[in-house]
Amino acid sequence: MEQARPNILQPNILYIHSHDTGRYIQPYGHALLTPHLQRLAEQGVLFRQAFSASSTCSPSRAALLTGQSPHSAGMLGLAHRGFSLYDYQQHLANALRAAGYSSLLLGMQHEARDPTLLGYDEIVEVASADTKDVVPRAVQLLKSGLPQPCFLSIGFSETHRPFHEPLSTQDEKYILPPVPLPDTPEVRRDMAAFKASVQKLDEAIGAVLAALEESGLAEHTLVICTTDHGLAFPRMKCNLTDHGIGVMLLMRGPGGFRGGKVCDALVSHIDIYPTLCELLHVPRPEWVQGCSLLPLIREEREQINEAIFAEVNYHAAYEPQRAVRTQRWKYIRYFDTHHRRPILANCDDGPTKDLLMRSGWGEATRRDEELYDLLFDPNEACNRIDDPELSTIADAMRQRLMQWMQATHDPLLHGAIPLPTGALANSPDQTSPEEPAQLIE
């Protein structure tokens, strides 16, 4: 890759990321008060139609930080279970070094078992990735001054399970569960605990942004705030409906990311990497598959993507699936024709899962293909794949997905994806990710 010239006038990049938050925050209209995230949205740009490239943890993060689909980057499963990138030199931290950036990692990362592989100049030691441990160190770093220009990644384990205890017993009375879930006392209590975790996350982000202001660097820093995928509830995380891949994305800072703008264009996590390349005048690597967001910000275009794509390979268990989404249509294909029931090991344990399992969720069946009309069915509840009136749409979406798989050299084109040597996976027949997993020697 061509070397970029260092430029001390380039903005800092503050990448703040959470775990399993989806879009369930105040700026997206949900009744979960997150005043600091609301303020960030009102100062910057809110992307209402932002999507992750996977609804599982490591693949989603790897896609954002390499600018390509998870299977192209090599992240086919969870890093802590033995999956890895094909080439860690493709990580954003390495690309920014060529432009003169120093890089620091603080808190959560999920792209490598060994974080030293990622290319950061400094890995800040903390006791955990919980907000209580990350925030004091983040504030200290910002107030003491950062090397200029700097790429600072701050990751929080919130809002991953286990959730924080609800702040009030009243929360479970008045909270509304997410659309795919029933409104029952058990689910409301579960969602009240999620609300407590979101509030902890919001407080943490507020403290970091306040420290950024006090440091005098706020005007010269591009803040990127997002999450990896949807909530750790059934029918959300690990699913390719919008409940699984829809993510918050708020950006504030130089390059036009100011003014309380709302963008309704279809965007993907893989678009962040090329956006930074254009903004920072860094040569765009040949492997990058996304599109820069800057034409949207400059109001030169209303859309940069006709479609976005997402995938699942391994989470706790193998569950290969692919999706293509346009503004109007969603097509999902499952490639494992042997397991047509929910892969329960790929759903995090919790009270809502327990309720659904007691009610027979494990015996439900699915189709190998799904087609949803997002205009008339935004909650993706009515599969139209067999509707003869939509056969032309279904064929077009199948073809679009296949063309993408071929263009990105998807390993699923050659059959089932084997578990890498040294990696762990649960059986698709197990009911919990906490059950013993299989190790490939």
Image (tube, rainbow, N blue to C red):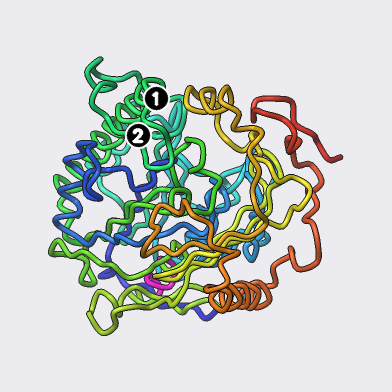
Residue span colored magenta: 272-277
Secondary structure type for disc 2: loop
Q: Quadrant of residue 85?
A: bottom right
Q: Which mark is residue 177?
A: 2
Foreground residue among 356 and 28: 356
Marks 1 and 2 sit apart, C-alpha to C-alpha, by 9 Å
**Does residue 288 appear in the picture of this structure?**
no
- What's the residue at 64%, 32% (across, down)? 362
To which residue does mark 1 refer? Answer: 190
Where does the image place residue 229, in percent across and percent down from the top left?
A: 46, 48
Relative to 262, 259 lies left or right: left
Relative to 109, 74 lies left or right: right
The three-letter amino acid code for the residue at tag 1 is: Asp
**Does residue 86 appear in the picture of this structure?**
yes
Bin the neighbour count of mark 2 within 10 Å (Cα to Cα): few under 14, some 14-19, many 20 and up: some
**Image quadrant in which the C terminus is located:** top right
Labels 1 & 2 near each other (Cβ < 8 A): yes
- What's the residue at 32%, 59% (across, down)? 13
